[in-house]
Image (cartoon, rainbow, N blue to C red):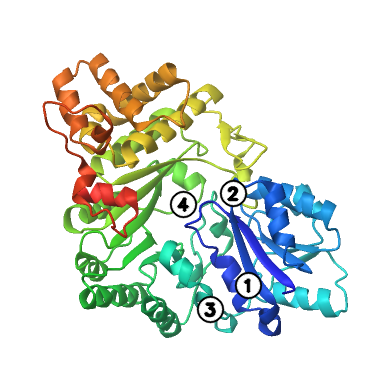
Amino acid sequence: MTILLSTLNARYAHASLGLRYLLANMGALQAQTRLQEFVIGAKTADLVEKLLASKPRIIGFGVYIWNIDETTRLVSMLKRVAPEVVIVLGGPEVSYEPEQQEIVRLADYLVTGWGDVTFPKLCAQILHGPQPLMKIHAGVQPPLAEIALPYTHYSAQDIAHRLIYVEASRGCPFKCEFCLSSLDKTAWPFALDDFLAELEQLHARGARLFKFVDRTFNLNIKSSLRIMQFFLEKLAAHPDDPVYAHFEVVPDHLPDALKEGIKQFPPGSLQFEIGIQSFNPQVQALVSRRQDNDKAAENIRWLIEHSHAHLHVDLIAGLPGEDLASFASGFDRLVALGPHEIQFGILKRLRGTPIIRHTEPFKLVFDAHAPYTILATDRIDFATMQRLVRFARYWDLVANSGRFVHTLALILADAPFARFMALSDWLYAHTDATHRIALERLAALVAQWLATQGIAAAAASAAIGGDGAGQSLPQQHGRRHTAASAVKADSALPRRQARHLAA
Protein backbone atom coordinates (compact mmCIF):
# COMPACT_ATOMS: atom_id res chain seq x y z
CA MET A 1 0.00 0.00 0.00
CA THR A 2 1.41 3.39 -1.05
CA ILE A 3 -1.51 5.85 -0.96
CA LEU A 4 -3.99 6.40 1.87
CA LEU A 5 -7.24 8.31 1.36
CA SER A 6 -8.51 9.61 4.67
CA THR A 7 -10.92 12.01 6.32
CA LEU A 8 -12.59 12.66 9.65
CA ASN A 9 -16.34 12.14 9.26
CA ALA A 10 -18.80 13.87 11.56
CA ARG A 11 -20.30 10.51 12.58
CA TYR A 12 -19.51 6.88 11.93
CA ALA A 13 -22.73 6.54 9.90
CA HIS A 14 -21.38 9.08 7.40
CA ALA A 15 -19.25 7.26 4.83
CA SER A 16 -17.23 9.61 2.62
CA LEU A 17 -18.56 9.62 -0.93
CA GLY A 18 -15.72 11.92 -2.06
CA LEU A 19 -12.98 9.52 -1.00
CA ARG A 20 -14.71 6.66 -2.76
CA TYR A 21 -14.83 8.70 -5.96
CA LEU A 22 -11.08 9.24 -5.69
CA LEU A 23 -10.46 5.54 -5.12
CA ALA A 24 -12.64 4.59 -8.09
CA ASN A 25 -10.66 6.91 -10.35
CA MET A 26 -7.10 6.03 -9.29
CA GLY A 27 -6.54 3.96 -12.43
CA ALA A 28 -3.26 2.07 -12.34
CA LEU A 29 -2.65 3.31 -8.78
CA GLN A 30 -5.88 1.85 -7.40
CA ALA A 31 -4.27 -1.42 -6.34
CA GLN A 32 -1.89 0.46 -4.05
CA THR A 33 -4.52 2.81 -2.64
CA ARG A 34 -6.92 2.27 0.24
CA LEU A 35 -9.38 4.13 2.44
CA GLN A 36 -8.94 4.81 6.14
CA GLU A 37 -11.78 6.88 7.61
CA PHE A 38 -12.09 8.22 11.14
CA VAL A 39 -14.64 10.14 13.19
CA ILE A 40 -14.07 13.57 14.71
CA GLY A 41 -13.29 13.59 18.41
CA ALA A 42 -10.53 10.96 18.37
CA LYS A 43 -7.08 11.66 19.85
CA THR A 44 -4.73 13.08 17.26
CA ALA A 45 -1.79 10.88 18.31
CA ASP A 46 -3.94 7.76 17.96
CA LEU A 47 -4.92 8.76 14.42
CA VAL A 48 -1.32 9.46 13.46
CA GLU A 49 -0.30 6.04 14.76
CA LYS A 50 -3.03 4.30 12.76
CA LEU A 51 -2.23 6.21 9.58
CA LEU A 52 1.48 5.47 9.76
CA ALA A 53 1.02 1.79 10.63
CA SER A 54 0.72 0.90 6.94
CA LYS A 55 3.78 3.02 5.98
CA PRO A 56 2.11 5.14 3.27
CA ARG A 57 4.07 7.30 0.84
CA ILE A 58 1.13 9.66 0.28
CA ILE A 59 -1.86 10.54 2.45
CA GLY A 60 -4.74 12.45 0.87
CA PHE A 61 -7.10 14.21 3.28
CA GLY A 62 -10.66 15.34 2.59
CA VAL A 63 -11.08 18.64 4.47
CA TYR A 64 -14.49 20.01 5.39
CA ILE A 65 -15.89 22.70 7.65
CA TRP A 66 -16.65 20.16 10.39
CA ASN A 67 -13.15 18.65 10.48
CA ILE A 68 -10.81 21.50 9.55
CA ASP A 69 -9.51 22.11 13.09
CA GLU A 70 -8.87 18.47 13.90
CA THR A 71 -7.39 17.75 10.48
CA THR A 72 -5.01 20.71 10.88
CA ARG A 73 -3.75 19.23 14.15
CA LEU A 74 -3.47 15.84 12.48
CA VAL A 75 -1.42 17.15 9.55
CA SER A 76 0.77 19.15 11.90
CA MET A 77 1.66 16.08 13.96
CA LEU A 78 2.19 13.93 10.87
CA LYS A 79 4.70 16.40 9.45
CA ARG A 80 6.55 16.42 12.77
CA VAL A 81 6.87 12.66 13.24
CA ALA A 82 6.91 11.54 9.59
CA PRO A 83 8.00 14.46 7.40
CA GLU A 84 8.80 12.08 4.55
CA VAL A 85 5.09 11.26 4.06
CA VAL A 86 3.58 13.47 1.37
CA ILE A 87 0.36 15.17 2.45
CA VAL A 88 -2.18 16.15 -0.23
CA LEU A 89 -5.29 18.12 0.72
CA GLY A 90 -8.63 18.45 -1.03
CA GLY A 91 -12.23 19.27 -0.26
CA PRO A 92 -14.44 22.36 -0.10
CA GLU A 93 -12.89 23.87 3.03
CA VAL A 94 -9.42 24.20 1.46
CA SER A 95 -10.51 24.87 -2.12
CA TYR A 96 -11.03 28.57 -1.39
CA GLU A 97 -8.86 31.15 0.35
CA PRO A 98 -6.01 28.63 0.73
CA GLU A 99 -3.43 31.33 1.38
CA GLN A 100 -5.16 32.10 4.69
CA GLN A 101 -5.07 28.55 6.06
CA GLU A 102 -2.47 26.98 8.33
CA ILE A 103 -3.28 23.48 7.11
CA VAL A 104 -2.34 24.45 3.54
CA ARG A 105 0.98 25.84 4.76
CA LEU A 106 1.70 22.55 6.55
CA ALA A 107 0.76 20.25 3.67
CA ASP A 108 2.81 19.44 0.60
CA TYR A 109 0.11 19.80 -2.05
CA LEU A 110 -3.45 20.99 -2.47
CA VAL A 111 -6.04 20.03 -5.09
CA THR A 112 -8.84 22.58 -5.32
CA GLY A 113 -12.31 21.77 -6.63
CA TRP A 114 -12.91 18.47 -8.43
CA GLY A 115 -10.24 15.89 -7.61
CA ASP A 116 -11.40 12.89 -9.66
CA VAL A 117 -8.83 13.41 -12.43
CA THR A 118 -6.28 15.73 -10.85
CA PHE A 119 -5.55 13.80 -7.65
CA PRO A 120 -4.54 10.51 -9.38
CA LYS A 121 -2.38 12.47 -11.83
CA LEU A 122 -0.68 14.32 -8.97
CA CYS A 123 -0.02 11.07 -7.10
CA ALA A 124 1.56 9.54 -10.22
CA GLN A 125 3.90 12.53 -10.53
CA ILE A 126 4.86 12.34 -6.84
CA LEU A 127 5.63 8.63 -7.08
CA HIS A 128 7.15 8.37 -10.56
CA GLY A 129 8.08 11.90 -11.60
CA PRO A 130 8.52 14.43 -12.88
CA GLN A 131 8.00 16.00 -9.45
CA PRO A 132 5.22 18.61 -9.34
CA LEU A 133 6.54 22.16 -9.44
CA MET A 134 3.51 23.84 -7.90
CA LYS A 135 1.90 23.32 -4.52
CA ILE A 136 -1.67 24.20 -5.53
CA HIS A 137 -3.33 22.31 -8.37
CA ALA A 138 -6.70 23.41 -9.72
CA GLY A 139 -8.92 20.37 -10.14
CA VAL A 140 -9.88 19.52 -13.70
CA GLN A 141 -13.62 19.10 -14.22
CA PRO A 142 -14.08 16.34 -16.79
CA PRO A 143 -17.33 15.30 -18.46
CA LEU A 144 -19.23 13.12 -16.00
CA ALA A 145 -19.11 10.22 -18.44
CA GLU A 146 -15.34 10.07 -17.87
CA ILE A 147 -15.65 9.69 -14.09
CA ALA A 148 -15.75 6.15 -12.73
CA LEU A 149 -18.65 5.71 -10.33
CA PRO A 150 -17.68 4.89 -6.73
CA TYR A 151 -20.40 2.60 -5.46
CA THR A 152 -18.52 -0.71 -5.60
CA HIS A 153 -16.19 0.80 -2.99
CA TYR A 154 -18.88 0.77 -0.33
CA SER A 155 -17.89 -2.26 1.74
CA ALA A 156 -20.21 -4.85 3.23
CA GLN A 157 -19.57 -3.14 6.58
CA ASP A 158 -20.64 0.21 5.08
CA ILE A 159 -23.82 -1.28 3.67
CA ALA A 160 -24.70 -2.96 6.95
CA HIS A 161 -24.07 -0.02 9.25
CA ARG A 162 -23.90 3.29 7.37
CA LEU A 163 -25.93 5.59 5.16
CA ILE A 164 -25.14 5.03 1.51
CA TYR A 165 -24.55 8.41 -0.14
CA VAL A 166 -25.30 8.58 -3.86
CA GLU A 167 -25.66 11.32 -6.46
CA ALA A 168 -27.54 11.34 -9.72
CA SER A 169 -26.11 14.77 -10.59
CA ARG A 170 -23.52 17.29 -9.53
CA GLY A 171 -23.83 21.03 -9.26
CA CYS A 172 -26.77 23.40 -8.90
CA PRO A 173 -28.31 25.99 -11.22
CA PHE A 174 -29.35 28.30 -8.38
CA LYS A 175 -27.28 31.17 -7.00
CA CYS A 176 -28.06 31.29 -3.26
CA GLU A 177 -25.11 33.25 -1.94
CA PHE A 178 -24.74 31.38 1.35
CA CYS A 179 -24.18 28.05 -0.46
CA LEU A 180 -21.04 26.79 -2.19
CA SER A 181 -23.20 25.27 -4.92
CA SER A 182 -23.97 28.82 -6.06
CA LEU A 183 -20.54 28.74 -7.76
CA ASP A 184 -21.49 25.82 -10.00
CA LYS A 185 -23.63 27.83 -12.45
CA THR A 186 -25.50 24.71 -13.54
CA ALA A 187 -26.16 21.04 -12.71
CA TRP A 188 -24.64 18.10 -14.57
CA PRO A 189 -26.48 14.75 -14.63
CA PHE A 190 -24.77 11.37 -14.62
CA ALA A 191 -25.95 8.91 -17.27
CA LEU A 192 -29.18 7.72 -15.70
CA ASP A 193 -29.06 4.11 -16.93
CA ASP A 194 -25.55 3.68 -15.55
CA PHE A 195 -26.52 5.28 -12.25
CA LEU A 196 -29.61 3.09 -11.84
CA ALA A 197 -27.51 0.01 -12.60
CA GLU A 198 -25.24 1.02 -9.71
CA LEU A 199 -28.26 1.40 -7.42
CA GLU A 200 -29.39 -2.05 -8.50
CA GLN A 201 -26.05 -3.51 -7.48
CA LEU A 202 -26.09 -1.71 -4.15
CA HIS A 203 -29.58 -3.01 -3.43
CA ALA A 204 -28.56 -6.54 -4.39
CA ARG A 205 -25.70 -6.29 -1.89
CA GLY A 206 -28.14 -5.32 0.87
CA ALA A 207 -28.13 -1.51 0.81
CA ARG A 208 -31.41 -0.11 2.11
CA LEU A 209 -30.65 3.44 3.34
CA PHE A 210 -29.92 5.74 0.38
CA LYS A 211 -29.17 9.43 0.86
CA PHE A 212 -29.00 11.50 -2.32
CA VAL A 213 -26.58 14.41 -2.11
CA ASP A 214 -27.99 16.11 -5.24
CA ARG A 215 -28.72 19.74 -4.47
CA THR A 216 -31.81 19.76 -6.69
CA PHE A 217 -33.27 16.27 -6.99
CA ASN A 218 -36.54 17.44 -8.55
CA LEU A 219 -34.95 19.72 -11.14
CA ASN A 220 -35.40 17.23 -14.00
CA ILE A 221 -38.77 15.61 -13.38
CA LYS A 222 -38.28 12.79 -15.89
CA SER A 223 -35.10 11.69 -14.13
CA SER A 224 -36.71 12.13 -10.72
CA LEU A 225 -39.62 9.91 -11.72
CA ARG A 226 -37.34 7.14 -12.99
CA ILE A 227 -35.31 7.17 -9.78
CA MET A 228 -38.45 7.14 -7.67
CA GLN A 229 -39.82 4.30 -9.77
CA PHE A 230 -36.69 2.30 -8.98
CA PHE A 231 -37.44 2.59 -5.27
CA LEU A 232 -41.15 1.93 -5.70
CA GLU A 233 -40.36 -1.29 -7.55
CA LYS A 234 -38.06 -2.38 -4.73
CA LEU A 235 -40.73 -1.58 -2.16
CA ALA A 236 -43.30 -3.61 -4.09
CA ALA A 237 -40.97 -6.56 -4.58
CA HIS A 238 -39.62 -6.58 -1.01
CA PRO A 239 -42.34 -5.21 1.31
CA ASP A 240 -40.76 -6.94 4.31
CA ASP A 241 -37.31 -5.53 3.55
CA PRO A 242 -38.06 -1.93 2.54
CA VAL A 243 -35.73 0.72 1.18
CA TYR A 244 -35.48 4.25 2.55
CA ALA A 245 -34.57 7.21 0.32
CA HIS A 246 -33.64 10.78 1.25
CA PHE A 247 -33.81 13.57 -1.34
CA GLU A 248 -33.17 17.31 -1.25
CA VAL A 249 -35.91 19.03 -3.24
CA VAL A 250 -36.69 22.50 -4.54
CA PRO A 251 -39.76 23.59 -2.58
CA ASP A 252 -41.66 25.45 -5.29
CA HIS A 253 -41.32 22.83 -8.05
CA LEU A 254 -43.65 19.90 -7.46
CA PRO A 255 -45.62 19.16 -10.64
CA ASP A 256 -48.54 16.72 -10.64
CA ALA A 257 -46.52 13.88 -12.18
CA LEU A 258 -44.08 14.00 -9.27
CA LYS A 259 -46.91 14.21 -6.74
CA GLU A 260 -48.43 11.03 -8.16
CA GLY A 261 -45.16 9.22 -7.68
CA ILE A 262 -44.67 10.56 -4.15
CA LYS A 263 -48.15 9.44 -3.10
CA GLN A 264 -47.22 5.82 -3.80
CA PHE A 265 -44.49 5.64 -1.17
CA PRO A 266 -45.60 3.96 2.06
CA PRO A 267 -44.85 5.40 5.52
CA GLY A 268 -41.23 5.27 6.57
CA SER A 269 -39.71 4.99 3.09
CA LEU A 270 -39.23 8.57 1.90
CA GLN A 271 -37.70 11.73 3.35
CA PHE A 272 -37.46 15.16 1.77
CA GLU A 273 -35.07 17.88 2.84
CA ILE A 274 -36.59 21.18 1.80
CA GLY A 275 -34.70 24.46 1.96
CA ILE A 276 -36.94 27.43 2.68
CA GLN A 277 -34.19 29.44 4.46
CA SER A 278 -36.33 32.61 4.61
CA PHE A 279 -39.88 33.62 3.75
CA ASN A 280 -38.86 37.29 3.41
CA PRO A 281 -38.82 38.28 -0.31
CA GLN A 282 -36.41 41.19 0.29
CA VAL A 283 -33.94 38.90 2.07
CA GLN A 284 -34.30 36.29 -0.68
CA ALA A 285 -33.48 38.92 -3.31
CA LEU A 286 -30.43 40.09 -1.34
CA VAL A 287 -28.92 36.60 -1.34
CA SER A 288 -29.97 35.82 -4.94
CA ARG A 289 -32.46 33.15 -3.92
CA ARG A 290 -35.33 32.60 -6.33
CA GLN A 291 -38.35 31.12 -4.60
CA ASP A 292 -42.11 31.37 -4.97
CA ASN A 293 -43.03 31.42 -1.29
CA ASP A 294 -46.73 30.79 -1.78
CA LYS A 295 -46.07 27.85 -4.09
CA ALA A 296 -43.45 26.47 -1.67
CA ALA A 297 -45.92 26.70 1.22
CA GLU A 298 -48.64 25.09 -0.88
CA ASN A 299 -46.33 22.20 -1.77
CA ILE A 300 -45.27 21.60 1.81
CA ARG A 301 -48.91 21.59 2.86
CA TRP A 302 -49.73 19.12 0.07
CA LEU A 303 -46.90 16.81 1.12
CA ILE A 304 -48.12 16.84 4.72
CA GLU A 305 -51.73 16.17 3.77
CA HIS A 306 -51.37 13.79 0.82
CA SER A 307 -48.11 11.88 1.23
CA HIS A 308 -46.25 9.79 3.78
CA ALA A 309 -42.97 11.59 3.14
CA HIS A 310 -41.08 12.74 6.22
CA LEU A 311 -40.34 16.46 5.80
CA HIS A 312 -37.19 18.11 7.11
CA VAL A 313 -37.43 21.84 6.30
CA ASP A 314 -34.58 24.34 6.72
CA LEU A 315 -34.58 27.94 7.93
CA ILE A 316 -31.47 30.11 8.36
CA ALA A 317 -31.17 32.83 11.02
CA GLY A 318 -28.77 35.72 10.49
CA LEU A 319 -29.18 36.32 6.77
CA PRO A 320 -28.40 39.89 5.67
CA GLY A 321 -31.42 42.15 5.87
CA GLU A 322 -33.46 39.90 8.16
CA ASP A 323 -34.31 41.09 11.66
CA LEU A 324 -35.75 39.07 14.53
CA ALA A 325 -39.36 39.97 13.74
CA SER A 326 -38.98 38.87 10.12
CA PHE A 327 -37.37 35.58 11.10
CA ALA A 328 -40.03 34.97 13.75
CA SER A 329 -42.77 35.56 11.18
CA GLY A 330 -41.20 33.05 8.79
CA PHE A 331 -40.75 30.53 11.57
CA ASP A 332 -44.39 30.81 12.61
CA ARG A 333 -45.51 30.43 9.01
CA LEU A 334 -43.44 27.28 8.66
CA VAL A 335 -44.68 25.80 11.94
CA ALA A 336 -48.25 26.34 10.76
CA LEU A 337 -47.52 24.18 7.71
CA GLY A 338 -46.68 21.27 10.00
CA PRO A 339 -43.40 19.73 8.75
CA HIS A 340 -42.05 16.90 10.87
CA GLU A 341 -38.80 18.72 11.53
CA ILE A 342 -37.64 22.31 11.20
CA GLN A 343 -33.87 22.55 10.98
CA PHE A 344 -33.15 25.91 12.57
CA GLY A 345 -29.71 26.81 11.22
CA ILE A 346 -27.48 29.77 11.97
CA LEU A 347 -25.79 31.40 8.96
CA LYS A 348 -22.19 30.31 8.34
CA ARG A 349 -19.66 31.95 6.06
CA LEU A 350 -18.53 29.07 3.90
CA ARG A 351 -15.22 29.88 2.23
CA GLY A 352 -15.71 31.02 -1.34
CA THR A 353 -19.40 31.88 -1.08
CA PRO A 354 -20.61 35.29 -2.33
CA ILE A 355 -22.36 36.05 0.99
CA ILE A 356 -19.19 37.90 2.01
CA ARG A 357 -20.15 40.80 -0.28
CA HIS A 358 -22.77 41.85 2.27
CA THR A 359 -20.31 42.12 5.16
CA GLU A 360 -19.93 45.90 5.19
CA PRO A 361 -23.45 47.01 4.15
CA PHE A 362 -25.12 44.78 6.75
CA LYS A 363 -22.35 44.72 9.37
CA LEU A 364 -22.01 40.95 9.25
CA VAL A 365 -19.70 39.67 11.96
CA PHE A 366 -18.59 36.05 11.61
CA ASP A 367 -16.62 33.89 13.99
CA ALA A 368 -13.03 33.68 12.74
CA HIS A 369 -12.92 29.96 13.53
CA ALA A 370 -14.82 27.04 11.98
CA PRO A 371 -17.69 26.71 11.41
CA TYR A 372 -17.57 30.52 10.89
CA THR A 373 -20.99 31.15 12.42
CA ILE A 374 -22.59 34.59 12.20
CA LEU A 375 -22.18 36.46 15.50
CA ALA A 376 -24.08 39.67 14.77
CA THR A 377 -25.60 41.77 12.01
CA ASP A 378 -26.91 45.31 11.81
CA ARG A 379 -30.38 43.87 12.56
CA ILE A 380 -29.53 41.26 15.22
CA ASP A 381 -26.97 42.06 17.91
CA PHE A 382 -24.64 39.52 19.51
CA ALA A 383 -26.77 38.92 22.61
CA THR A 384 -29.86 38.24 20.50
CA MET A 385 -27.91 35.98 18.15
CA GLN A 386 -26.79 33.98 21.17
CA ARG A 387 -30.42 33.56 22.16
CA LEU A 388 -31.15 32.27 18.65
CA VAL A 389 -28.26 29.79 18.88
CA ARG A 390 -29.72 28.44 22.12
CA PHE A 391 -33.20 28.39 20.59
CA ALA A 392 -31.83 26.22 17.76
CA ARG A 393 -30.23 23.77 20.17
CA TYR A 394 -33.29 23.46 22.42
CA TRP A 395 -35.54 23.16 19.36
CA ASP A 396 -33.47 20.18 18.30
CA LEU A 397 -33.72 18.61 21.75
CA VAL A 398 -37.44 19.21 22.21
CA ALA A 399 -39.15 19.55 18.82
CA ASN A 400 -36.93 17.70 16.34
CA SER A 401 -36.07 14.82 18.63
CA GLY A 402 -39.59 13.43 18.34
CA ARG A 403 -39.66 12.93 22.11
CA PHE A 404 -42.17 15.73 22.83
CA VAL A 405 -44.62 15.36 19.97
CA HIS A 406 -47.78 15.89 22.04
CA THR A 407 -46.21 18.32 24.51
CA LEU A 408 -44.99 20.57 21.69
CA ALA A 409 -48.53 21.73 20.94
CA LEU A 410 -48.83 22.98 24.54
CA ILE A 411 -45.48 24.71 24.31
CA LEU A 412 -46.12 26.53 21.03
CA ALA A 413 -49.84 27.31 21.40
CA ASP A 414 -50.77 30.21 19.12
CA ALA A 415 -47.39 31.97 19.10
CA PRO A 416 -44.73 29.37 18.22
CA PHE A 417 -41.63 31.53 17.96
CA ALA A 418 -42.36 33.77 20.93
CA ARG A 419 -43.39 30.86 23.12
CA PHE A 420 -40.43 28.68 22.27
CA MET A 421 -38.04 31.61 22.69
CA ALA A 422 -39.52 32.12 26.16
CA LEU A 423 -38.98 28.43 26.95
CA SER A 424 -35.43 28.63 25.56
CA ASP A 425 -34.56 31.63 27.72
CA TRP A 426 -36.07 29.93 30.76
CA LEU A 427 -34.23 26.65 30.17
CA TYR A 428 -30.91 28.42 29.84
CA ALA A 429 -31.54 30.48 32.97
CA HIS A 430 -32.26 27.29 34.92
CA THR A 431 -29.53 25.05 33.47
CA ASP A 432 -26.78 27.29 32.08
CA ALA A 433 -26.39 24.56 29.46
CA THR A 434 -27.57 23.57 26.01
CA HIS A 435 -25.87 20.18 25.84
CA ARG A 436 -25.79 17.05 27.95
CA ILE A 437 -29.17 17.61 29.53
CA ALA A 438 -30.54 14.22 30.52
CA LEU A 439 -33.93 13.43 29.00
CA GLU A 440 -35.51 12.91 32.41
CA ARG A 441 -34.32 16.34 33.55
CA LEU A 442 -35.39 17.99 30.30
CA ALA A 443 -38.88 16.52 30.56
CA ALA A 444 -39.20 17.73 34.16
CA LEU A 445 -38.00 21.22 33.19
CA VAL A 446 -40.49 21.44 30.33
CA ALA A 447 -43.26 20.45 32.74
CA GLN A 448 -42.13 23.16 35.18
CA TRP A 449 -42.11 25.79 32.45
CA LEU A 450 -45.58 24.81 31.28
CA ALA A 451 -46.76 25.35 34.86
CA THR A 452 -45.38 28.91 34.76
CA GLN A 453 -47.52 29.47 31.66
CA GLY A 454 -50.71 28.48 33.45
CA ILE A 455 -50.92 24.96 32.04
CA ALA A 456 -52.53 22.64 34.55
CA ALA A 457 -50.14 20.09 36.00
CA ALA A 458 -52.43 17.21 34.99
CA ALA A 459 -52.53 18.38 31.35
CA ALA A 460 -48.77 18.83 31.18
CA SER A 461 -48.17 15.47 32.82
CA ALA A 462 -50.56 13.71 30.46
CA ALA A 463 -48.90 15.25 27.40
CA ILE A 464 -45.36 14.42 28.49
CA GLY A 465 -46.41 10.97 29.69
CA GLY A 466 -47.78 10.22 26.23
CA ASP A 467 -44.53 11.26 24.57
CA GLY A 468 -41.18 9.57 24.16
CA ALA A 469 -39.89 11.80 26.94
CA GLY A 470 -42.45 10.24 29.26
CA GLN A 471 -40.51 6.98 29.45
CA SER A 472 -37.90 8.78 31.53
CA LEU A 473 -40.36 10.03 34.14
CA PRO A 474 -42.03 8.18 37.02
CA GLN A 475 -45.20 6.38 35.93
CA GLN A 476 -48.25 8.66 36.02
CA HIS A 477 -51.71 7.39 37.04
CA GLY A 478 -50.67 3.75 36.49
CA ARG A 479 -50.14 4.34 32.75
CA ARG A 480 -46.92 4.65 30.86
CA HIS A 481 -46.92 4.99 27.10
CA THR A 482 -44.26 6.22 24.69
CA ALA A 483 -44.66 7.45 21.16
CA ALA A 484 -41.72 5.29 20.15
CA SER A 485 -43.31 2.08 21.40
CA ALA A 486 -45.10 1.46 18.12
CA VAL A 487 -41.82 1.25 16.24
CA LYS A 488 -40.03 -2.07 16.11
CA ALA A 489 -36.78 -2.07 18.03
CA ASP A 490 -34.91 -3.32 14.98
CA SER A 491 -36.38 -0.70 12.62
CA ALA A 492 -33.97 0.33 9.86
CA LEU A 493 -35.32 3.87 9.93
CA PRO A 494 -33.28 6.67 11.44
CA ARG A 495 -34.40 6.79 15.07
CA ARG A 496 -35.64 10.35 14.84
CA GLN A 497 -37.95 9.59 11.92
CA ALA A 498 -39.12 6.39 13.59
CA ARG A 499 -40.32 8.35 16.60
CA HIS A 500 -42.19 10.83 14.40
CA LEU A 501 -43.73 7.97 12.45
CA ALA A 502 -44.93 6.26 15.60
CA ALA A 503 -46.49 9.46 16.89
Name the disc covering residue 40, or none: 2
Give how far apart the Cα atoms at labels 3 and 2 are: 27 Å
Q: Nearer the viewer, residue 481 or 429?
A: 481
The answer to whether 68 appears left or right of 228 in the picture is right
The answer to whether 364 appears left or right of 289 in the picture is right
Give how far apart the Cα atoms at labels 4 and 1 are: 32 Å
Q: Position of residue 403 (x, y in %)?
A: 28, 38
Residue type highlighted by circle 2: Ile
Residue shown at 11%/26% (left/top)?
477
Q: Tell me the crowding category of disc 4: few under 14, some 14 to 19, or many 20 or more residues within 10 angstroms, Cα based.
A: many
Sequence-wise, the earlier of marks 4 and 2 is: 2
Residue tagged 1: 22
Sequence-wise, the earlier of marks 3 and 2 is: 2
Give how far apart the Cα atoms at labels 1 and 2 are: 21 Å
Q: Are marks 4 and 2 in contact (CB under 8 Å)?
A: no
Q: Are marks 4 and 1 in contact (CB under 8 Å)?
A: no
Q: Which quadrant of the figure has residue 79?
A: bottom right
Residue type highlighted by circle 1: Leu
Q: Nearer the viewer, mark 4 or mark 1?
A: 1
Up-down: is 384 above or below 125? Answer: above
Asked which secondary structure carries label 4, the reply is: loop
Placement of the C terminus among the 4 image quadrants: top left
Give how far apart the Cα atoms at labels 4 and 2 are: 33 Å
Q: Position of residue 32 (x, y in %)?
A: 70, 78
Sequence-wise, the earlier of marks 4 and 1 is: 1
Residue shown at 23%/55% (left/top)?
488
Residue tagged 4: 289
Up-down: is 86 above or below 435? Answer: below
Give how far apart the Cα atoms at labels 1 and 3 are: 10 Å
